[in-house]
Image (tube, grey):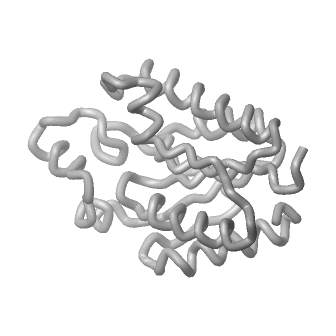
Amino acid sequence: MSTHAFAIWVTGLPASGKSTIAAALIRKLNSRNIFPLVLESDRMRRILTPAATYSDDERDRFYGQLADIGAAAVNDGVPVIFDATANRKSYRDHARSAISRFVEVYVNSPLALCMARDPKGIYADARTGRSATVPGIQSQYEPPDHPEIVLDGVQPPELNADRIIELLESLGYV
């Protein structure tokens, strides 16, 4: 296994800042010649569930498959970044149980801030009834009990990415 084979699951409410933090983290890892596989939920949904309904059963299957893909990559020596809400703890716990070098990053952002950001319009869809499964609104979001790190989604993404790098260094992953 590569010395750089690890997985990071960046979780938080939709629009909490996960993707911008993940993008900053990727740049910082790339500058160290570490090139992770990024499993971003919207992109992976187009592959695994192209006609997504976001039902509980579909989410169970989707996040199980996502965790299994990430575990296979790490087992093959490829570092992985999961950029996915994964609204249930069990989804992230499945990945943690399958990946020994696993880091859970919780991006803690107030719901009001997430709703104000709303780059994809999902909170607007929830308000108008076009969506009935938005985590934090109609579907519960279960924050991690014991993440390796909690980030403030209000802070600049580069600063948050630096904190993740510091954690990875302290764990001996980078």
Residue 7 location in percent, x, y?
Answer: 71, 49
* Image position of 1 (left or right of 125): right
Q: Is residue 147 above or below residue 69?
A: below
Residue 155 versus residue 35 in the image, above or below: below
In x, y percent, where is residue 85? 47, 46
Q: Does 125 sit left or right of 171 as displayed?
A: left
Residue at 23% of width from left, 33% of height from top? 132
Taking depth in this image into account, of 112 and 23 the one nearest to the observer is 23
| Residue drawn where x is 35% and y is 28% of the image | 54
Q: Residue furthest top?
A: 57
Q: Quadrant of the C terminus?
A: bottom right
The location of residue 152, given as percent across then percent down, is 50, 72
Q: Toward the viewer: 129 or 48? A: 48
- Out of 39 and 132, give the one closest to the viewer: 39
Task: Using the rendered image of the protein, determine whether residue 145 is visible from the camera's viewpoint.
Answer: no
Q: Residue at x 81, y 36 (%)?
A: 75
In the displayed structure, 150 sits above or below 75; it is below
- State the residue lying farthest toward the left: 128
Say which quarter of the image contains residue 28: bottom right
Q: Position of residue 106 (x, y in %)?
A: 56, 59
Q: Report whether residue 119 is seen.
A: yes
**In percent of the image, x 68 and y 67: which residue is there?**
29
